[in-house]
Image (tube, rainbow, N blue to C red):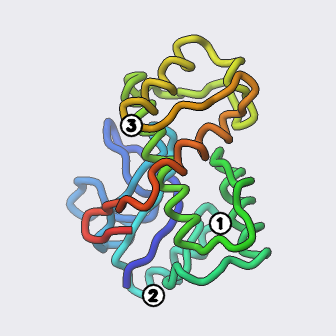
Amino acid sequence: MIRYYILPIEHMEDWRGPKYFQWDFDPDPPGIACRWSMRDYGSIDIAVLAADITQADHDALTLNSDVYAFPENLDPLMTLVNRQAMNTYLEAHGIPGDWLKQGDTFRMALRTITAMFLYLQRVLAILGYPADPFAGLTLNTRYGQLTTTYQDTLEQAANSLGFTWDVAANDQIRKIWKLMADQWGSQPFYFGFVVL
């Protein structure tokens, strides 16, 4: 079955891969052995992961407190409890979650988060993938508080994706991520073996 998760990324030498899954080049790597594809949060060590996973492996994976598991059916409306749980997880991992609202489905939420990650990948590619790209910054940091380099890079990333750049000095980073995510619209997101 295909399931989606948000989970940490771990490192091995110059490589990065999803925690709890097989991905490295050891002869007998630990972790869940299945097809997976991830979209990372730029060089920040968290990712959205699609996995073709067994129920037993899914059940074991969800015992880890640093994993957020989406339901198999992404189309139901999220309840208030669902939205609160997702918001808590996202905010604890440096991902905006305050935009979640009544009427959102799990699919809508997953697409928004994936779109944020894809925008940030573009930003960090322009910056050259620094190890700690937002040291000293938070989701509540305002655009006007950023260095000129960061301001120019955020706008350049938006322009390179064909997005409209309508950001004010008082806009927080969390708002910018969401504004950029919304501009992906309904275009498909490819996770190797599955399309979201």
Closer to the chain start, of discs 1 and 2, is 2
Query: Which disc number belongs to residue 56?
Result: 2
Q: Amino acid at mark 2?
A: Ala
Name the image quarter holding the N terminus: bottom left
Give the mark nearest the N terminus, 3 or 2.
Answer: 2
Sort mark 3 into few (<14), some (14-19) or many (20+) by Cα contacts within 10 Å: few
Q: CA distance from mark 3 to mark 2?
A: 42 Å
Residue type, numbered disc 1: Ser
- SS at mark 1? loop
The residue carrying mark 1 is 65
In the image, which disc is placed on residue 109? none
Q: Is residue 136 left or right of residue 117?
A: right
Q: CA distance from mark 1 to mark 2?
A: 17 Å
Viewer-nearest residue: 44 or 101:
101
Describe residue 154's horizontal placement relative to residue 135 as left or right: left
Q: Are marks 3 and 1 in contact (CB under 8 Å)?
A: no
Image location of residue 12, percent across then percent down: 36, 44
Residue appearing at x 55%, y 74% in the figure: 70
Quadrant holding the C terminus: bottom left
Report the residue at 30% width, 71% height from top: 194
Residue that sits furthest to the top in the current view: 148
Q: Sequence-wise, which precedes: disc 3 or disc 1?
A: 1
Q: Which mark is residue 162?
A: 3
